[in-house]
Image (cartoon, grey):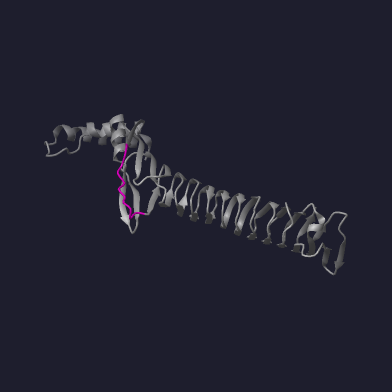
Amino acid sequence: MGKRELGLILAFVVAGVIVWQVTAPRAEGPGFSLGNWLSETRREIRGRRASAEVTTAPAIPIDSSINGLRLTLSGEVTIKGEDRADIASELRVVSNGFDEAEAKKLAGDLRLTVSRFADSVVVGWERPEPGRQQPTLILRVPSRLRIQLEGRGTAEVTGVESVTLARQTGRLKLASILGSVSGESRGGVTVDGAEMVDLSIAGNQTTIRGVRGEVRLNVRSGEVRLEQVAGRLMLSGTDMRVRVDGAEGEVRAEIADGELELNDVSAPVDIDARGTPVTIGWLRAAPAKVQVRDDGLELVLPKDADSYSLDVRATRGELRVPERLHKTTEGEDTIVTKTARANAPSIFVRGVGASITIR
């Protein structure tokens, strides 16, 4: 069928609709209107180009029995812990629409839902079907509350008792957390001050600093930066790129197919790395056990040579050392040892199929 035939068919259809509109009996209700249809079609073609903003203060009632807040993230959320007994809220919503009146109505139709579960208040969202709404929510809450976040969105949380992440995605900034930060994140997380951290993270960028206690991280594909961690640091995972600056507590790491850099080490180290380049630089001598396979290891030893003993063995690999150290060989093994004064900590290294450089 050619273009001419299709054009004729379309013309007949349009003519038939017009004739039907003119001759059809008046029906009860709105019925079909060619004018309305054309108007709606023009609206759809033009699109929702108008926008409007509505600001409200939704009520989130709590009493002394409420110890937690569970929130589904959407848009941008700010939670500030304060010395107060209630929750103050501000919800600002920007919506699009075919015209300003519709946009304003749709913005006002986005509301918070509030319920209770055990000792927590649960906050979610009720959205209108049409249009696109961008909410910004600010909550001022009692600092004693435990906060649980889930869903996708951007959030900034400060000064609360604890934060739990329930498969959260999006960007989070957590600061001055009185207790723990824990849970599972598939987004970017920054923690600046907490008592302890215990996170499972995947495919994101994570920065953690100023933690007073223990840090536990299980990582599947991600980048991690840690600074000023006072307690024990425990790392595990695959395809993880980790940099640690100034760890004051013991460092334990089990990593495959990643990268690990430890700077200014002054506490015990226990590393098991496979297919992972590792760099360790000591600020002060401390006991160390380092095992590497199928990749590289670079050690920057403490400046005081008398403060540590050294026992390094590379099997089926390469061992590069400064002139002050003497290498020996035993079959497939290249060995370097150095003794120090009594009770000096020992740095113990084993490499298989690895390139080891000592500075």
Q: Is residue 210 above or below residue 96?
A: below
Kindly report the secondary structure that dominates the magenta region of the rendered protein: loop
Side of 90 relative to 157 (left or right): left
Residue 221 in magenta? no
Q: Position of residue 194 (x, y in %)?
A: 52, 51
Decide which of 300, 94 is in the foreground and name it.
Answer: 300
Side of 280 relative to 77 (left or right): right
Decide which of 313, 275 is in the foreground and name it.
Answer: 313
Decide which of 355, 218 is in the foreground and name it.
Answer: 218
Whether residue 352 appears in this view of the structure is: no
Q: Position of residue 42 (x, y in %)?
A: 31, 31
Residue 60 in magenta? yes
Q: Position of residue 108 (x, y in %)?
A: 29, 37
The magenta span reads 56-66
Residue at 39% x, 50% y is 72
Residue at 61% x, 56% y is 239
